[in-house]
Image (cartoon, rainbow, N blue to C red):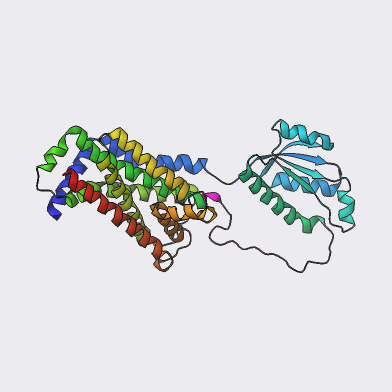
């Protein structure tokens, strides 16, 4: 069995060597997609267009205004003194946010009183508005001890401490998800096209005449792509560390193990699709739709699973990227061992076993 399986694998490797365009695409596509989406996708917000309505004009008001501009998050578009200029600034798109400083701001601060400062946001993009609001709160909280005279401290003094991602960079959260997203798409499409190609070229009939059994055919077809997928995963994680400064705190052995389990499930899904499709065009469309959308929407890559409706949360258990993402972030960002993510590995094994079993049954019928 092993000999025949290796023979099919060697045949597939030779085919990949001859078809250098496909091989190059399989190796380069994950890296290109990681560069493209890694720089394009970000929850960080910078250069927010800010209009300041300074009705005070005092020193404390200037310090507050300068704190916003010097933070690096805001770009001052206009300094106005008339509150009536606020609405036209938002209507024209010149402002995404506005800081309104009341006329007695400096005098009230000098008297040791609390002064309400209005911060106006364009809420058409709720995600950006939420992020910008958090920036504004941090800035005001950071300068309050400086611009306000000494006063009696409050009963609680918050001192936040952030683990795993002290700078709260969104790339640390998004890039591992991108690795899972890219590997799932490429692994499914690669194997789906490889088997369907045999049908289109008529070589499947020749394989049926050999003593190969379905399991040998399945393993022989997937092993070369497992090697290619592992190489792509290693390259993607290296680029994530090199370009996006994503730390890898955990064991490379455990990281490789869960990646192989994830790739095995994706490759098995690709083979299953290939048994249902008769042309490469159909196989490509099925593979893209069945891998891209669930991984993007239902894996926790961007949208938290805990915030989804309960029926949708149950449905996410059949999405392998859900398990891989948790294990990947636990290993890469937290340096956690199997005691933390063993249940995610069980989910990957269960998915791979079911998918490979179904693919083997379908392959038996085709052979």
Q: Is residue 291 left or right of residue 104?
A: left
Q: Is residue 45 visible?
A: no
Which residue reaches farthest front? 311
Observer able to see residue 177:
yes
Q: Quadrant of residue 348?
A: bottom left
Is 361 placed left or right of 310 in the picture?
left
The percent position of residue 2, horizontal first and vertical second, equals 15, 55
Q: Which residues are magenta?
A: 148-171
For the C terminus, give its image quadrant. top left
The residue depicted at 12 percent of the width and 39 percent of the height is 206
Q: Main secondary structure of the magenta part?
A: loop
> Which residue is painted at 44% across and 66% down in the image?
340
Image spot of residue 156 (x, y percent): 73, 68
In the image: residue 239, left or right of residue 149: left
Which of 326/54 is in front? 326
Q: Nearer the viewer, residue 227 or 219?
A: 219
Asked if the magenta segment contains residue 342, the reply would be: no
Relative to 207, 20 lies left or right? right
Instruction: Tell which residue pokes out farthest to the top in this image.
Output: 92
Magenta run includes residue 170: yes
Quadrant for the N terminus, please: bottom left
Q: How many marks?
A: 0
Where does the image place residue 247, in percent across and percent down from the top left?
47, 56
| Residue at the image point whose x is 44% and y is 65% from the top | 336
Q: Quadrant of residue 283?
A: top left
User: Could you tell me residue 161's position as x and y percent?
Assistant: 61, 63
Image quadrant in which you'd find residue 87: top right
């Amino acid at each position: 069995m092993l000999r025949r399986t290796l023979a099919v694998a060697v045949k597939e490797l030779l085919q990949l060597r001859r078809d250098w365009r496909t091989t190059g695409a399989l190796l380069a596509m994950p890296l290109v997609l990681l560069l493209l989406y890694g720089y394009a996708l970000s929850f960080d917000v910078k250069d927010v267009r800010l209009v300041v309505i300074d009705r005070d004009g005092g020193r404390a008001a200037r310090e507050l205004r300068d704190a916003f501009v010097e933070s690096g998050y805001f770009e001052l578009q206009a300094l106005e003194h008339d509150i009536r200029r606020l609405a036209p600034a938002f209507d024209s798109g010149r402002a995404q946010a506005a800081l309104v400083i009341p006329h007695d701001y400096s005098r009230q601060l000098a008297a040791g009183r609390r002064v309400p400062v209005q911060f106006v946001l364009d809420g058409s993009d709720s995600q950006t508005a939420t992020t910008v609001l958090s920036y504004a709160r941090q800035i005001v909280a950071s300068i309050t001890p400086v611009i306000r005279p000494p006063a009696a401290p409050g009963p609680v003094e918050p001192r936040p401490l952030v683990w795993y991602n002290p700078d709260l960079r969104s790339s640390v959260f998004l890039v591992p998800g991108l690795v899972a997203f890219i590997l799932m798409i490429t692994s499914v499409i690669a194997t789906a096209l490889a088997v369907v190609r045999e049908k289109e070229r008529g070589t499947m009939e020749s394989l049926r005449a050999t003593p190969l059994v379905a399991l040998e055919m399945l393993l022989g077809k997937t092993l070369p792509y497992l090697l290619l997928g592992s190489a792509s995963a290693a390259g993607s994680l290296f680029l994530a560390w090199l370009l996006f400064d994503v730390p890898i705190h955990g064991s490379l052995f455990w990281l490789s193990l869960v990646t192989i389990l994830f790739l095995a499930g994706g490759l098995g899904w690709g083979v299953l699709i290939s048994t249902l499709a008769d042309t490469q065009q159909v196989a490509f469309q099925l593979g893209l739709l069945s891998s891209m959308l669930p991984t993007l929407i239902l894996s926790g890559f961007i949208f938290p699973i805990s915030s989804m409706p309960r029926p949708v949360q149950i449905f996410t258990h059949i999405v392998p990227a859900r398990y891989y993402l948790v294990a990947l972030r636990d290993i890469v960002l937290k340096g956690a061992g199997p005691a933390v993510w063993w249940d995610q590995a069980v989910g990957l094994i269960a998915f791979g076993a079911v998918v490979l079993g179904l693919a083997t049954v379908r392959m038996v019928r085709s052979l």
